[in-house]
Amino acid sequence: MATANVRETPPRRRERAREGDGGVGAGRGMAWLLMVTGAAGVLAGWVITIDKFKLLEDPNFTPGCSLNPVVSCGNIMKSEQAAVFGFPNPMLGLVTYAVVVAVGAGLLAGARYRGWFWLGLNAGMLFGVGFCTWLMYQSLYEINSLCLWCCLAWTATLVMFWYVTSHNVRSGVLPAPVALKGFFEDFTFALPVLHAGIIGMLILTRWWDFWTS
């Protein structure tokens, strides 16, 4: 009985070729995506950390991204949720997003990583998405303020998560039916777009009266 074949793109063929010699690589597109999204996360974490230090030095300091009662980074930084692990959340981001940049740079240089490494990376990003989702809920419905730099970090996290998940499914690191592999081959882009769209709609509806007044 003939088995269904999933159309393979050139990057996918390179990934498959690398699986046989002890590791799974990725194309340049994946490498650059990890580097760009990781850099965006580092940037967001760096700016928020600097502003947090300034706020600790001067309680009257107003961060540059505090634009109005809704878009107010200062309110976020002063909240208990901004240091849920006992230190400012952005400091965690500075480390984790830097790791993502390093992984992307390694892939760009031709590195191949074992399956356990890809699974660990995927699990870390899943934790990141979960943590960002919790922070988003706290921001919208408990703190009642929005931080633009936080939004950048949320977006970077969900994009890297969906693309790493897609890579792991397509390369066989994550077992999946042929149909699901085919979906990821052609429509990976739809998942972060849909995810970001849901967040955007929640933000829009949460402060609908403010945006439309």
Image (tube, helix red, strand yellow):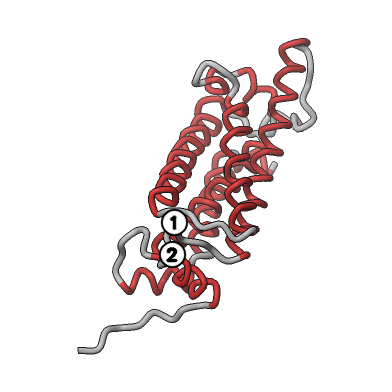
Q: Nearer the viewer, residue 179 or 80?
A: 179
Q: Which mark is residue 165?
A: 1
- Estimate the x, y position of residue 191 in percent, counting from the top left: 48, 60
Q: Earlier in the sequence, mark 1 or mark 2?
A: 2
- Tell me the residue at 60%/21% (across/down): 88
Callout 1 secondary element: helix
Amino acid on which disc 1 is placed? Thr
**Few, some or many C-alpha atoms within 10 Å of disc 2 (few <14, some 14-19, many ≥20)?**
few
**Which residue in the protein does label 2 denote?**
21
**Few, some or many C-alpha atoms within 10 Å of disc 1 (few <14, some 14-19, many ≥20)?**
many
- Tell me the residue at 48%/44% (across/down): 125
Q: Is residue 61 above or below residue 95?
A: above
Q: Nearer the viewer, mark 1 or mark 2?
A: 2
- Tell me the residue at 43%/64% (across/down): 21
- Name the image quarter holding residue 49: top right
- Distance between mark 1 and mark 2 Cα atoms: 22 Å
Left or right: 167 as drawn, with respect to 176: right
Left or right: 211 as drawn, with respect to 7: right
- Estimate the x, y position of residue 181 in percent, counting from the top left: 38, 70
Amino acid on which disc 2 is placed? Asp
- Estimate the x, y position of residue 35 in percent, counting from the top left: 65, 51
Q: Nearer the viewer, residue 32 or 40?
A: 32
Callout 2 secondary element: loop
Q: Is residue 33 above or below residue 15?
A: above
Count the labels in the image.
Answer: 2
The residue furthest bottom is 1
- Tell me the residue at 60%/39% (across/down): 207
